[in-house]
Image: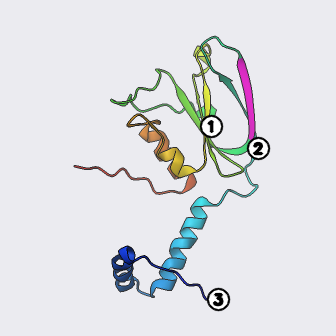
Amino acid sequence: MNKTLYVKDCDAEVWAEAEKLAPGGLSPLVTNLLADYVKRNRPPNGEGFERIVVEVRQKQFGPVVKKAFTGRWLIMPGDKFQAEREDSGYHWNRGSAFAVAQTKAGRIAVYKFVPDDLQEESSCLEVYENYDDFKDARVDKYSRYPENLVAAVSTALGHPYEIDLDI
């Protein structure tokens, strides 16, 4: 099978450097990179899917609304995953815990809740189109989620996770 890739002039230098570095040529390099991309972004197969139901309370002491979807837990509510520390820029509610699921459609669902002993607090479910949208979610200029949560989700999905420091 023949495929043709068109390279923008501004990307020509990167392609030339890659061609020099690729031991078997560009075709095997591009194939390996695409295989890795597909592996990391393909919605999971039917294994591990279940009906997931979470309780969401929009306001303190407000009514509880149950929300359900089909997915698989990456971080289960029973794990009571919490931030390792309060971030200096964005503070998560004291005692807040997080659970994260991947939906059958490949989306990322983040359930933020307060463990059993403080159930009068609010809880929410936020859904992101894909892993990158979850990882890049912000409140003002600060990350919406603790670094250790993003790192744990990255590990569960087989994504590399690094924080680039401008130091």
Q: Residue at x 46, y 35 (%)?
A: 144
Q: What span is in magenta? A: 64-69
Tag 3: residue type? Met
> Where residue 50 is drawn, which disc sits there?
2
User: For the stretch drawn in magenta, what is the main secondary structure?
Assistant: strand
Q: Quadrant of the N terminus?
A: bottom right
Tag 1: residue type? Met
Of 88 and 85, the residue lying toward us: 88
Q: Earlier in the sequence, mark 1 or mark 3?
A: 3
Residue 133: image location, x then y, percent: 53, 47
Residue that label 1 marks? 76
Seen in the picture, residue 91 relative to 1 is either above or below; the reply is above
Seen in the picture, residue 70 relative to 67 is either above or below; the reply is below
Q: Are marks 3 and 2 in contact (CB under 8 Å)?
A: no
Residue 83: image location, x then y, percent: 45, 32
Seen in the picture, residue 10 relative to 159 is either above or below; the reply is below
Residue that label 3 marks? 1
Which image quadrant for residue 90?
A: top left
